[in-house]
Image (tube, helix red, strand yellow):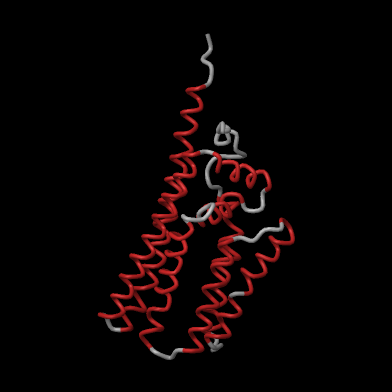
């Protein structure tokens, strides 16, 4: 199958923040803000978690009504909140509370690695949500990139790195919970989690943009040179 020149003919280069904003706001920021605001106001952990899950649920409903598709990031966030809700109901153990987030992190790492056996890895869909958002032209462009072997290989690398990194980070955080006082774990664990995610996002962006640059250079070399 011939590989189309979809890289250079895409709607726009890069990973524009405008396309990332809805996912960051509705699926990530709002659930966190709701949880901490309600928890600080004295609402139970259960109530705070359930309320936080409403934002990604409504965002997925909006996307489904508009485009008849679901976005994995919102589903993952809702799943994490559901697991946290269940955990808050069945366990009062301090150690379990300390490692709960690490177990969720590890589960996402396993999802990433397991998705390598699926038709497309999970990071294909998560990055697509940030890159394309609800823009039909960008969605078509991103989906068309899957026909390019280098793109498929790059997504496999990105998904593998995310999976391994999250498993390692979860293991380190569980180790800290076993060896450090709870107060120190509570202070260190969120910093590690956000730091790892930030590094992975930055590396993934650089990795995918480098692929685009290489592809553009290769396509330009194939163009007829002016005589």
Q: Which of 144 and 47 is in front in this view?
A: 144
Above or below 34: residue 14? above
Give residue 24's position: percent from left, percent from top.
56, 61
Picture coordinates of residue 19, whole percent (x, y): 60, 52
Q: Residue at x 47, y 23 (%)?
A: 221
196 or 139: nearer the viewer:
139
For residue 208, above or below residue 53: above
Residue occupying the far right of the picture: 65
In the picture, residue 61 is in which quadrant? bottom right
- Left or right: 171 in relation to 31: left
Kindly identify the residue that appears in the image at 53 percent across and 52 percent down. 120
Residue drawn at (49%, 42%), measured in percent from left and top?
Answer: 151
Quarter of the image for residue 191 reads: bottom left
At 31% from the left and 79% from the top, the residue drawn is 177
Residue 207 placement: quadrant? top left
Q: Is residue 20 left or right of residue 204?
A: right
* Left or right of 191, for residue 175: left
Across and down, in percent, residue 128 comes to 57, 51
Quadrant containing the N terminus is: top right
Q: Position of residue 200 (x, y in %)?
A: 41, 56
Residue nearest the observer in this picture, 199 or 142: 142
What is the number of callouts on the image? 0
Establish if 51 lies above or below 67.
Answer: below
Farthest top residue in view: 227
43 up-or-down from 132: above or below: below
């Amino acid at each position: 199958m011939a590989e189309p020149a979809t890289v250079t003919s895409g709607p726009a280069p890069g990973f524009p923040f405008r396309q990332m904003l809805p996912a960051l706001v509705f699926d990530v920021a709002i659930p966190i803000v709701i949880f901490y605001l309600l928890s600080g106001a004295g609402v139970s952990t259960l109530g705070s978690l359930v309320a936080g899950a409403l934002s990604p649920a409504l965002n997925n409903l909006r996307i489904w009504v508009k485009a008849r598709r679901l976005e994995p990031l919102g589903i993952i966030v809702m799943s994490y909140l559901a697991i946290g809700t269940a955990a808050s109901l069945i366990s009062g153990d301090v150690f379990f509370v300390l490692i709960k987030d690490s177990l969720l992190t590890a589960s996402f790492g396993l999802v990433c690695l397991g998705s390598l056996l699926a038709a497309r890895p999970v990071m294909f869909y998560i990055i697509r949500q940030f890159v394309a958002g609800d823009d039909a032209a960008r969605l078509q462009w991103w989906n068309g990139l899957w026909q390019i072997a280098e793109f498929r290989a790059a997504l496999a690398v990105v998904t593998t790195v995310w999976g391994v990194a999250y498993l390692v980070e979860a293991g380190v955080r569980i180790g800290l919970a076993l060896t450090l006082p709870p107060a120190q774990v509570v202070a260190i664990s969120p910093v590690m989690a956000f730091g790892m995610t930030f590094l992975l996002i930055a590396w993934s962006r650089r990795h995918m943009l480098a692929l685009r640059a290489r592809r553009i250079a290769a396509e330009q070399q194939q163009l007829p040179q002016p005589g």
